[in-house]
Each structure stands twice: as structure tokens, then as C-alpha cells.
Amino acid sequence: MTDILLASPRGFCAGVERAIAIVERALALFGAPIYVRHEVVHNKYVVDGLRAKGAVFVDELDQVPDGGTVIFSAHGVSKAVQAEAARRKLNVFDATCPLVTKVHLEVARQRAQGREVVMIGHKGHPEVEGTMGQSPDGMHLVERVGDVPRLTLANPDQVAYVTQTTLSVDDAAAIVAALKERFPNIVGPRKDDICYATQNRQDAVTRLTSNCDVIVVVGSPNSSNSNRLREVARHGGARAYLVDRAAELDPDWFLNARAIGVTAGASAPEVLVAEVIESVKAMANGTVVETDVAPEGVVFPLPKALA
């Protein structure tokens, strides 16, 4: 028998639970359709489920009719999007994760103090676009250590950095070190921007790699934090795979595996984890071993208008 070790914590974080609840509550109060700008969280199963209940996912606000109710995704939006919604008098509910909002407030604080802001993150990710859009100027994006030497700043002594909340902890630390080496007076956030859930799930995967030679991450391919979990597992020496659903599993992955680890990104529901576990058990003739539960105990309240 092959041991199947389940990571803890795994799956939904407080920000994702809040974002989904905001959409469901808005649908219950106002009825369909409720418009959602971008995927409220990056998980196909979740998005399809909300769409079936009456949520309409749009790319831009011009797809929302006048007088419509729109929800901003957990990843946050730019000041320009907020201003457009206000100008059109749309009924807005903001599902931005409070930890992303913290980064937005940090950008505003640093710009108010005259500092340019370097954001560490992945170009094109909705969270990065929203954070970069918190200021009309003075913002710079770096994705890797090699980007740091190419930065051109107006005043190298007046600079701060912020971080996308779902990055690899180790990758972000390497970029911060490079920034500090080039800009000795750079200012960082008072508290690390990488969110508690991202950190905890990466730590759980790191623990798995000491016992598992194969790790399956449940999550959608456009989920940043899920991709980072796969990277952490690979860096730890495991063969790691990212799957949206159990149907994507390949029995060949588990041939001669001593132990198999299973985890899930912060936007992947437990129902998909259970589905994957049952398939892995059948493919690998495995038995499930639940690791020590590490409760997080974090809850973010709904907007007052929806509470």
C-alpha cells in the first residue's frame, strides 16, 4: 500500500470564502443577474457554479448595463475601474481580499510620502494590475531578480516595495534581497505582503516533500498560488503536478511512488480535493494519512450592506 499524505492547511482561505459569499449573498438579495468583473476567484469549478446561479462574469465594466450590480473580484481593481463604476453609478460590492487592500493602502501611503513603488509580481495577473493601478505614476513592476538592474528610478533614495500576495516566499525574498542591495534605503511594508494562507500552504507542501516523492496540487492553471505550490514541491525534490479535476490525473505519475502528497490552492474547494483523493487511492492502491491539522481561524466579514 502507498501512503497518501494530505497537506494541512490546504484549500480555501478566508479571502476566497468571503469573495464567494459576497456573490452568493448578492444573488440572494438582488436576484440574477449579478455581474462580476473578472473571475471572482481563480477556480473553474467555483466560477462555473456561480455562473449557474446567475452570476455573469465580464472582462470590463462597459459590459455591465446601467443600474446593474457589479462585484469586484478578490484580486482587487485599479483606481480607474473604481472611478468608472462611480461615474456610472453602478451598485458595487467589493470582494477584494482585505490582504490585497492592505497592499493598496501601502502603495497610497508610500506615494503620499514621495516614494516610487516597486511591485514584485507577475505581469498580467489581476492582482498586479489592480495594485499597479493604485497610482497614476511612480509604479514599477519586477517579476524576477534579473529585472532589478534594469530599474530606472527618479530618486533611488526614495523608493519602496510591495509584493503580490500569492508569490513563492523564497522567490520574493530573493528579489527583495536584490532590491535592497541596489537600493540600500528602500522601504518595505510594515508586515509581509505575502498572505498568511499562501505562506501556510507553501510551508505545508515543504513538509510533505520530506516524505513524498509525488505531490498533486488541486487548483486551476490560472491560479497563482496553486502554481507556486507546484513550484515549491518541485524545488523540494518531488515530482509535482497541478490538476483542476481528478479526470486530469495520470496513473503513470504514481508508478513506484513511496508516498504521495495531496494539497490544494487557496481557491480550490474541498469537494475537488476529495474527488482527487479517491482517484489517487484507486490508481496507486493507496491509503490516506491525514497530517496534523493546522487550523487558521481567520475570518473576513462581509460588506455591511450584505451582512
Image: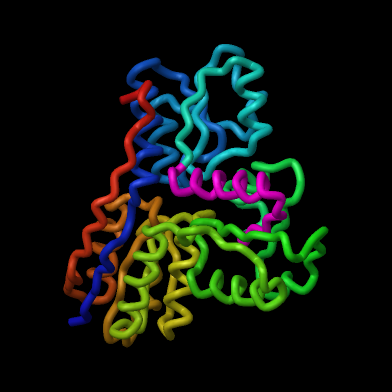
20 up-or-down from 113: above or below: above
Q: Viewer-proximal residue, 116 or 194?
A: 116
Q: How many callouts does the rendering have?
A: 0
Q: Could you tell me residue 73's position as x and y percent?
A: 50, 38
**Image quadrant where one finds the N terminus:** bottom left
Residue interval drawn in magenta: 97-121
Instruction: Please say whether residue 271 is visible from this viewpoint.
Output: no
Report x, y in % for residue 271: 27, 50
Point out the residue furthest to the top here: 67
Instruction: Residue at 52% x, 63% y: name it.
Output: 167
Query: Which residue does the image show at 40% across and 38% down from the upper left?
Result: 19
Tell me where residue 130 appears, x and y as whole percent.
61, 43
Taking the image as shown, residue 265 lies to the left or right of residue 178, namely: left
Quadrant housing residue 233: bottom left
Left/right placement of residue 148 relative to residue 71 reads right
Q: Does the magenta stretch include residue 148?
A: no
Quarter of the image containing the C terminus?
top left
**Nearest the camera: 150 or 280?**
150
The scheme the figure's colours follow is rainbow
Give residue 98's position: percent from left, percent from top: 43, 43
Main SS of the magenta part reads helix
The residue lying toward the viewer, choosing from 111 and 244, is: 111
- The answer, for residue 238, to whether it is visible in the render is yes
Residue 278, quarter of picture: bottom left
Q: In which quarter of the image is residue 263?
A: bottom left
Q: Which residue is drawn at 63% across and 38% down?
A: 78
Above-or-below relation of 225 to 149: above
In reply to whether residue 102 is colored magenta, the answer given is yes
At horizontal 56% and vertical 49% (from top left) the residue drawn is 106
